[in-house]
Image (cartoon, helix red, strand yellow):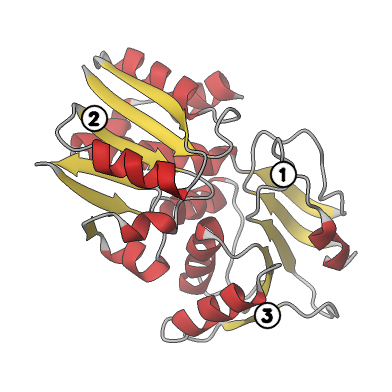
Amino acid sequence: MYKFYVIGNPISHSRSPLLFANIFKILNINAVYKPLLIKNSHNYKTFIQDIHNTNILGFNITMPYKILANEYIQTVEQKAQIIQSINCVHIKNNQLIGYNNDYIGFEKMMNYNKIKIDNTHNIIIGSGGTARSIILSLINNNAHTISILSRNEKTAKKIISNYSQYKQNTVLQLFQKKCNYNNVNLINCTPIGLIGKNNIEILKSIPKIHYNNIIDVNYNTKNNYFNFTSNKKIDGLDMLLFQALESLDIWFESNISNKLNYSELKKIIC
């Protein structure tokens, strides 16, 4: 039997175990996928050290360990190297190989929901691994401006510096409260709204304007903290699904996800 995990803190909200349980059943794969609470960086290091020589084929990483993963994974694919964030690990020949599927998950979510990025203005809330993935996707899809709103200005400045060679014509900057733009997307990449993550002071800085799109990468929040007017609002459920299918293909080294019906999978976890 193959074993897979999703690790993070918090982790009880994750729908990935339900999703993969159904995927394995549909594909007749003898495998289990379990959530694992990792309370701190020490526990994370121990998990990585103990994972060798097991029948674990791979695992997903969620907040807040996507960036920390870079310190412990031996081989990292190119996009994850640029983003400096890993959310999928494949264990092959006793080697840990790190990938970033948030990038493609976000891109496919935007296409699926018919949201165009070209020439848009974007406010990104957060500066963690998910934010970094989304920022690179926005750059590569010709966003006009990207403004990073983060409690950690030092980290936000580091992202701007690291992406300077990739930004092409996109203006990548720290968030300025004054916003005179039209065609603005608001994208939340923080765990605001999840259980135990109720620090919402940062919301006071968000301009109270009409947004083109509001995108919250969380998909299991109890409160709607982003209650601004907009043309469209979406959560991160599609992003979860698309990155999960990418993980499946990586772990089994094939396009096995093509055998699945996306709409039916979405019904299972909605």
Residue 255 can be seen in this image: no
Residue 52 percent across, percent down from the top left? 18, 38
Circle on res. 56? 2
Q: Amino acid at mark 2?
A: Ile
Between discs 3 and 1, the one toward the N terminus: 3
**Image point (35%, 61%), residue name:** 80
The alpha-carbon separation of the residues under discs 3 and 1 comes to 23 Å
View extreme (front): residue: 42
Residue 15 can be seen in this image: yes
Mark 3 or mark 1, whichever is nearer to me: 1
Between discs 2 and 1, the one toward the N terminus: 2
Where disc 1 sits, the SS reads loop
**Tag 2 near tag 1, CB within 8 Å:** no
Between discs 2 and 3, the one toward the N terminus: 2
The alpha-carbon separation of the residues under discs 2 and 3 comes to 41 Å
Residue 197 percent across, percent down from the top left? 72, 44
**Image point (60%, 29%), residue name:** 13
Residue located beneath label 3 in the image: 174
Badge 1: few (under 14), some or many (20 or more) residues near its Cα, within 10 Å? few
| Front residue (pair 70, 82) | 70
Circle on res. 160? none
Q: Is residue 213 left or right of residue 252?
A: right
Residue 7 percent across, percent down from the top left? 44, 37
**Image point (27%, 65%), residue name:** 78
Badge 2: few (under 14), some or many (20 or more) residues near its Cα, within 10 Å? many
Q: Amino acid at mark 1?
A: Lys
| Front residue (pair 133, 89) | 89
Where is 206 relative to 51, above or below? below
Where is 19 relative to 206, above or below? above
Residue 239 percent across, percent down from the top left? 52, 44
Residue located beneath label 1 in the image: 197
Q: Is residue 126 left or right of residue 20?
A: right
